[in-house]
Image (spheres, coloured by chain):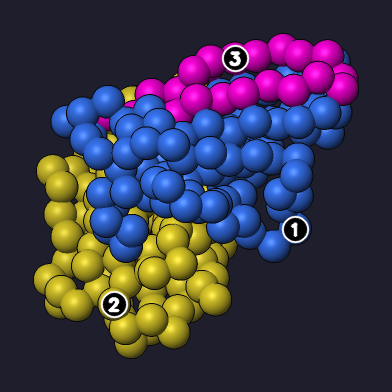
């Protein structure tokens, strides 16, 4: 149980284009979903937290207009990187929880490469 | 705000031996959870063990156990009978109402 999927697992896009990453909870309803960014050989940094039907809460320093998060249902959250640039290349990981302060279940991650 | 500190960027252990990974944290919360996650080369985050702060008993999961010292805000992970499959990055994390805060990680190398 508690499986989270991400799609795509790897995406390459050209500078200036937008790319959408999906995060789905497959066998449970997630009240809260989290988006993390991880650079090579570094730890996970929380970008934003989203609750179903509400606007996402972004961490300090994360551009809301660049990283659009939509949590339209209890099983789906999307992260759209708008006008991507090479510095946005990174590994993006989502997680989901049933209750906000309890255990988070992680997706397998999405590698984004912007050329 | 929470902080989590892992002071060992890299650790190496012989196969079948025991290794301890260190973690200290700081939080103003009274209700929080602590976790150790493993991230193998696939980069999938895998929960190794979790500890509820209100529980005095140290959590144990097979070969993995923790030494939770609440007053000292210390949460170390002991891996017994190390196996080649244990090689990975290990992240200590603290969770409260604001979500998860991760340490910088410890790269664990298993020597055959």
Q: Which residues are magenta?
A: A3-23
User: Label 2 near label 3: C-beta < 8 Å?
Assistant: no
Chain coloured blue: which letter? A
Image vertical order of residue B90 relative to residue B46, above or below:
below
The secondary structure making up most of the magenta span is strand
Name the residue: 76% across, 14% down: A13
Figure quadrant of residue A85: top right
Q: For mark 2, give the secondary structure.
A: loop
Foreground pick, B17 / A68? A68
Above or below for B2 versus B77: below
Whether residue B13 is visible: no
Alpha carbons under labels 3 and 2: distance apart: 37 Å
* Chain letter for the residue marked with disc 2 in the picture: B
Disc 2 marks which residue? B31
Q: Secondary structure at mark 1?
A: loop
Q: Residues within 10 Å of mark 1 (few under 14, many from 20)?
A: few
Give the Cα distance between marks 1 and 3.
25 Å
Q: Point out which mark residue B51 bears.
A: none
- Residue A88 shown in magenta: no
Q: Secondary structure at mark 3?
A: strand
Q: For mark 3, does the 10 Å Cα neighbourhood hold few (<14), some (14 to 19), or many (20 or more) residues?
A: some
Residue wearing tag 3:
A10
Q: Is residue B12 above or below residue A110?
A: below
């Amino acid at each position: 149980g508690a499986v989270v999927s991400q799609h795509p697992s790897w995406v390459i896009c050209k500078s200036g284009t937008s790319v959408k990453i999906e995060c789905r909870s497959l066998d449970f309803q997630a009240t809260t979903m989290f988006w993390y960014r991880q650079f090579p050989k570094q730890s996970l940094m929380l970008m934003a937290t989203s609750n179903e039907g509400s606007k996402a809460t972004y961490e300090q320093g994360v551009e809301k207009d660049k990283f659009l998060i939509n949590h339209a249902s209890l099983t789906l959250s999307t992260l759209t990187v708008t006008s991507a640039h090479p510095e946005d290349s990174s590994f993006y990981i989502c997680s989901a929880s049933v209750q906000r302060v309890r255990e988070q279940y992680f997706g397998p991650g999405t590698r984004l490469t912007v050329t | 705000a929470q902080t989590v500190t892992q002071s060992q960027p890299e650790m190496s252990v012989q196969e079948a031996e025991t290794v301890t990974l260190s973690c200290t944290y700081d939080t103003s919360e009274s209700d929080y959870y602590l976790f150790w996650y493993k991230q193998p080369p696939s980069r999938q985050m895998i929960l190794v063990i979790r500890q509820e702060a209100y529980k005095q008993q140290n959590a144990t999961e097979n070969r993995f156990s923790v030494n939770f010292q609440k007053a000292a805000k210390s949460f170390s992970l002991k891996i017994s009978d190390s196996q080649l499959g244990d090689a990975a990055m290990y992240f200590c994390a603290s969770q409260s109402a604001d979500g998860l805060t991760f340490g910088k990680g410890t790269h664990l190398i298993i020597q055959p």
